[in-house]
Amino acid sequence: MNVKRSRIMAIIALLVSCLALYASLKGLLDKNLYQDVVSAGTISESLAIGSIAQDIISIPLSIALALISLLSVKDPGPKKLIALLGLTGYFFYAYGLYVIQGQYTSIYLIYLAVFALSIYAIITGFLSFESITVKTYRLPPALRRAIIFFLLLILSILVPGWLLKISPSIANHIPDSIYAVYILDLAIVFPAFGLTAFMLLQRKAFGIILAGVVLFKIFTVCLSWGFAEIFLTYFGYTANYSMITISGTLTVISLALLVLYMLTVKSEPNPFNRK
């Protein structure tokens, strides 16, 4: 692992965490922040409530990102770097939604900064892994197969689901209110899941690194998604039980796989010497 690059990545991630924490606290404490854009017709009331739910989840995640960043600056390590990449991936996604869908609150430039810094942090983080070192990482074969199955299951369910949801918008030439989700998922996130599954199937060493990152991303984003679905019901919205079930199931499974991953990923020669 390139220690210098990993420390640079940790510093950028620390900036992301500080800006995200500010934005999340602002969203919770300033009642006019989202209401102003609702009044302007930029976003719907339900999206504003969903933004508050995301803020609630983002606060502990931004604190966790800050703590791991500080630890990584002092003592870099591969597991810390994987955690940083996964958590930064969450903020890339969360604030990418705001940036793409034009959620022009008074702190829109903060969203843009978090989104941009997250991109550079992720690039720097991946460049911190050196090919010689990566080849020594190993996962238990059963866990590797479980992760492959999980990723392919997500793709088999959500890709057709998202395509069905976006089709009417394409036919009517009018974007859906959550069109940013489809952009990020179909253009970036789902291809990354497919690439990770393929690399694990082909026993490519870097697939092990990607597996940890995507598990962090799935857990955090699905946690935020599921909480938002439940949070909406407290404001009188009808519960979408299918979305609650899907997001809840993905959250639980990804957390279980993530814990097993962090406990069992090791560095030793010939990482794929067993089936």
Image (cartoon, rainbow, N blue to C red):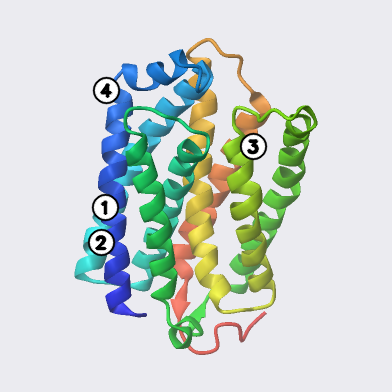
Which percent across, then down, holds residue 118?
A: 39, 54
The mark that comes first in sequence, 2 or 4, is 2
| Badge number at residue 29 | 4
| Badge number at residue 246 | 3
Q: Nearer the viewer, mark 4 or mark 3?
A: 4
Q: Which residue is mark 1?
A: 15
Tell me the SS state at disc 2: helix
Which percent across, then down, holds residue 135?
A: 51, 84
**Hey, what amino acid is under mark 3?**
Ile
User: Are discs 2 and 4 less than 8 Å apart at CB?
Assistant: no
User: Are discs 1 and 2 less than 8 Å apart at CB?
Assistant: yes
Tell me the SS state at disc 1: helix
Tell me the SS state at disc 3: helix
**Hey, what amino acid is under mark 4?**
Leu
**Hey, what amino acid is under mark 2?**
Ile
**Hey, what amino acid is under mark 1?**
Leu
User: Are discs 2 and 3 less than 8 Å apart at CB?
Assistant: no
> In this image, 256 relative to 177: left or right?
left
Q: Which residue is mark 2?
A: 11
Residue 255 in view (yes/no): no
Q: Nearer the viewer, mark 2 or mark 3?
A: 2
